[in-house]
Amino acid sequence: MRAARERSETTFSFLLPQRCPVCGEPADAARLFCEACERALPRLGVPVCARCLGEGSPPDACLRHPGDRVHAAFVYDDAVAALVHAIKFGSRPNLARAHIAALAAALPQRWRRPALVTAVPLHRTRRRERGYDQASAIGEALADALGVVFSDAVLERVRDTRAQSDLGPHDRRRNVRAAFRVRHPSWVAGRRVLVVDDVLTTGATLTEAMGALRAAGAHTAGAVLAWAQ
């Protein structure tokens, strides 16, 4: 599947040369942006607390919820939105690999060697419709960059929840409440598990997913491509 997508992107690049979505200059289709605009993508240098986001507290100075810390490569702006949209809706999950070094660099040293990397799962119905899971694509790329194990069999979404983008903060939290279960608690008990998603917005989804893992005995942190402030 991955090889077929890579061949498709190569063919697409040959037939329709890529233009940078920010400035319109020629760009490598495998990276989306021209070199100058890629260098200008806004990096995020501090962790964000997903639980504090949900509570309406300052999320970037939290010492109370170490298991809810989320590390993001970028701050969400129009350029990063184009990248996320291409990965999530544009059938271009391989773009995650081109930008995964920025996410790996955002992790503190102790989270660069977790026991396991997993991803916030789509419900099987939505994954079947899309053909892939964008969070798994990012998680697999990150695990490869770190040289650790990735598994998308750790968490299961037990309800086909509504799209979070359609909801406000309160409804987002209610929408994903008890939406995840840990399939194999023995895989995670006492281990450091890094949970990957595409974007952190209100923190509701990652808080629920990491909470399910901690209930099974895991030590958790999150990793996302971008924080939508």
Image (spheres, rainbow, N blue to C red):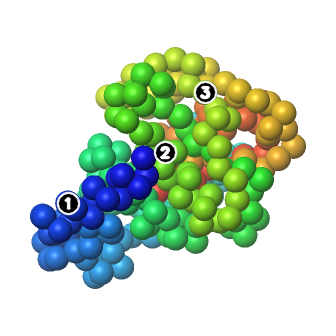
**In this rendering, the label closer to the viewer, 1 or 3:** 1
Which residue lies under the disc numbered 3? 156
Looking at this view, is 99 or 11 the one in front? Answer: 11
Q: Secondary structure at mark 3?
A: strand
Tell me which residue sits at (64%, 35%) in the image: 153
Establish if 204 lies above or below 39.
Answer: above
Which residue lies under the disc numbered 2? 135
Of callouts 3 and 2, the N-terminal one: 2
Which residue lies under the disc numbered 1? 12
Residue 172 found in image quarter: top left
- Residue 144, x across and y down, in percent: 60, 62
Which residue extends farthest top? 159
Q: Secondary structure at mark 2?
A: helix
Establish if 155 lies above or below 226.
Answer: above
- Residue 77, x across and y down, in percent: 31, 59
What separation in Å lies between label 3 and label 2 (alpha carbons)?
13 Å
- Within 10 angstroms of label 2, few (less than 14), some, or many (20 or more) residues? many
With 26 as the anchor, is 125 left or right in this view? right
